[in-house]
Image (cartoon, rainbow, N blue to C red):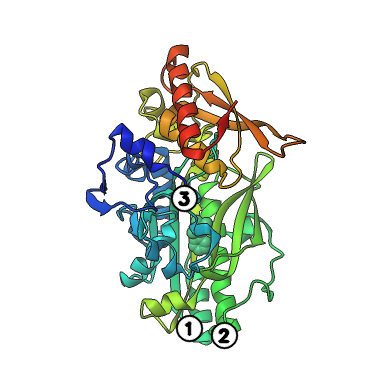
Amino acid sequence: MLGFNSARNKAGVQSEDTINVCGQEYTKDEWTNVTPNILSKTSRKLHLHQSHPISIIRQRIENHFATFKALNRFEPTVTTKMNFDDLCIPADHPTRVKSDNYYINATNMLRAHTSAHQLQGLESGATKFLISGDVYRRDEIDSSHYPVFHQMEGLQYFDMDPEITAKQVQDDIASQAELAANTVQLVDDTLVKPENPIQDRHAPEAAQAVVAHLKHSLNSMVRALFKDEPNLQVRWIDAYFPFTSPSWEMEIFYQGEWLEICGCGIVRQDLMDAAGLQNKIGWAFGCGLERLSMVLFDIPDIRLFWSEDERFLSQFAAGEIVKFKPFSKFPPCLKDISFWLPEKDWNENNFCEIVRGVAGDIVENVTKIDDFTHPKTQKRSVCYRITYRSMDRNVTNEEINAIQEKVRSTVEEDLSVQLR
Ligand code: PHE
């Protein structure tokens, strides 16, 4: 395990043995890797601020699925059981690694996806529901990656009897006013195949009907969100999630690129069973709200969502999608750092996390600009260029030098690298 915690404890930011997250005390252990910077985000709840772009998109989706129950107030602290085990994610699955997640301790974490609440949604008694919230993942640093972002989860289920399912699905599709599939340009050559199978417990007719309903629901959702886009192209591709089968990703073609919008599929029957719904069959999806907001509002940098600058916030009003008008950017300050890697345990996310921990939101980008292995010693050396820039003020060179020094000493101490 990497020694992240030593530096923080020395700084006296957290008490020795326990940590307070969202008003609750937890005992720390060797899994604890949440940082003060990350914990400060848990109280922001951007998805609940009526006139914030993230919230405007959430409300648009909720308006589209008007008959769904909206569950928006779950705290981001969940058990690892909720985030992983309940969703059929095996104990040794790579998605659980410490370097990709924010653990409070071995059994509690900041949720990595809103799917962590699927079971609670199913147990709420609603046959169709949406869940929105902030989710946390350790990641690289650039204009579209931030360790906190927001997701919207959707789930709807039907009776499992194939005739009833097909009937319920047809009635439901017919009852929806705005049509979807015939007003988007669909690219969908996905066929259910052995690699992405219908579950054994499901009659093929029932599963196919629910798949049709899922695709219709998501096609009409993007149609409604992008209503000013006359030739919206939507593409469906096969995917894999441990908690759905079959599974897909839906992408849209926007300004020359295919953008992934949602992951989705037919809910694993084990989950329905766990909620006491043995005779029901359902679909689920999960969408990133930042991605949708960035394209719909023309927001170029994901850090802007966290800005408290009036020049950002005052541009938006509840219910309205408007194009963001960039205000002048403050100048960047670039610093390079080079070091020899340790023989084992090197992980780039851990490095990025240190940079973020020290510099907070002033770090805009971390890019590797050099990577070589010494021909004789076989030692590997890397060089990263860190771009520092504030969203709302000028940064001084002295201030950035001090931050860079702190980054250098923390990286040296915590990651056992040899600075050059
Ligand atoms: N939770 C998945 C993710 O974050 C998305 C998803 C949700 C996929 C629901 C299938 C069903 O990537």
Could you tell me residue 104's position as x and y percent? 34, 52
Image quadrant occupied by the C terminus? top right
Q: Circle 2 — which element?
A: loop
Horizontal side of residue 154 vs 245, given as left or right: left
**Which of labels 2 and 3 is toward the front?**
3
- According to the picture, the residue beneath numbered tag 2 turns out to be 203
Q: Which picture quadrant has residue 14?
A: top left
Q: Pick whichever of labels 3 and 1 is earlier in the sequence.
A: 3
Could you tell me residue 380's position as x and y percent? 67, 37
The amino acid marked with disc number 1 is Met
Q: Spatial distance from mark 3 to mark 1, Cα to Cα? A: 46 Å
- According to the picture, the residue beneath numbered tag 3 turns out to be 1
Q: Pick whichever of labels 2 and 1 is earlier in the sequence.
A: 1
**Which of labels 3 and 1 is toward the front?**
3
Mark 3 touching mark 1, by CB under 8 A?
A: no
Residue at 36% across, 71% down: 122
Is the residue marked by circle 2 packed among few (<14), some (14-19), or many (20+) residues within 10 Å? few
**Residue closest to the eye, 200 or 105:** 105
Mark 2 touching mark 1, by CB under 8 A?
A: yes
Could you tell me residue 390's position as x and y percent? 45, 22
Q: Circle 3 — which element?
A: loop
Answer above or below: position of 293 versus 156.
above
Residue at 62% across, 53% down: 251
The amino acid marked with disc number 3 is Met
Answer above or below: position of 95 versus 326.
below
The amino acid marked with disc number 2 is Ala
Is the residue marked by circle 3 packed among few (<14), some (14-19), or many (20+) residues within 10 Å? few
- According to the picture, the residue beneath numbered tag 1 turns out to be 160
The answer to whether residue 285 shows anywhere in this view is: no
**Residue closest to the eye, 84 or 207:** 84
**Residue closest to the eye, 108 or 244:** 108
